[in-house]
Image: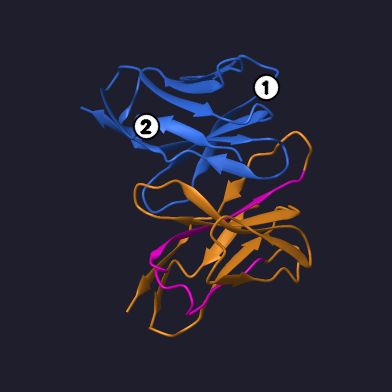
Amino acid sequence: GENVEQHPSTLSVQEGDSAVIKCTYSDSASNYFPWYKQELGKGPQLIIDIRSNVGEKKDQRIAVTLNKTAKHFSLHITETQPEDSAVYFCAASRGDDKIIFGKGTRLHILP
Amino acid sequence: DGGITQSPKYLFRKEGQNVTLSCEQNLNHDAMYWYRQDPGQGLRLIYYSQIVNDFQKGDIAEGYSVSREKKESFPLTVTSAQKNPTAFYLCASTATGATGQPQHFGDGTRLSIL
């Protein structure tokens, strides 16, 4: 079955710098890749997603890139702010209503 | 506002006791899911249901049971057979579709052992 690896598990960046989180997937049939942000004591919230027919997608300070050949995708957050501190999860799906999640990255924004 | 409501927010279980976690959605979604989250771990799928009166086991179904009698509701029972139930439980739902749809999550129930 699908396996999603996520790195790093913890990431600290200075406020205003960029943060990059990387994920790889194993199932070449996966065609949908969402990213979630989870704040303490809350459920994950979708922040951006990308489908396999697109190589890059951007929404203000957040962007996601997808390399289907290498089977990896990345989340890029620019001009980081204190409210970006949270746990981020990548995920992959074949479109059959099941989503496989990575183990998460705890992002710390340093003042 | 549409969304997913999980209750209670905190739950305590005694040894040998079954407890039921509630999940209700008003998004008119067909599919619903239960995940377990442990510290430093990703989300592990317990059970999911793609339609009323039907559900499938996920990766860690042992010690858990579910029902799907109504489209809006997908309660999870943690039975006494689940020997390590302390975790954060998340319910999610999604509109079904062939090209993948985002899952919408509730704010979770934290279950602890007394």
- Say which residue appears at 64% left-offset and 40% top-offset: B102
Q: Amino acid at mark 1?
A: Ser
- Image position, residue B19 (x, y; %): 50, 78
User: Is residue B76 at least partly visible in the picture?
Assistant: no
The residue lying furthest to the bottom in this view is: B16
- Say which residue appears at 47% left-offset and 38% top-offset: A102
Magenta region includes residue B78: yes
- Image position, residue A55 (x, y; %): 62, 14
Disc 2 target residue:
A84
Question: On screen, B50 above or below A20?
Answer: below
Relative depth, front residue between B53 and A63: B53
Relative depth, front residue between B45 and B96: B45
Q: Colour of chain A?
A: blue
- Image position, residue A39 (x, y; %): 39, 45
Could you tell me which quadrant the N terminus of chain A lies in?
Answer: top right
Return the chain for callout 2: A
Number of other residues with Cα within 10 Å of mark 2, as a class: few under 14, some 14 to 19, many 20 or more: some
> Judging from the image, what secondary structure is the residue with disc 1 in?
loop
Determine which quarter of the picture holds residue A68.
top right
Return the chain for callout 1: A
Q: Which residues are magenta?
A: B74-96
Disc 1 target residue:
A52
Question: On screen, A85 above or below B95?
Answer: above
Could you tell me which quadrant the C terminus of chain A lies in?
Answer: top left
Q: Amino acid at mark 2?
A: Asp
The residue lying furthest to the front in this view is: A1
Q: Colour of chain B?
A: orange
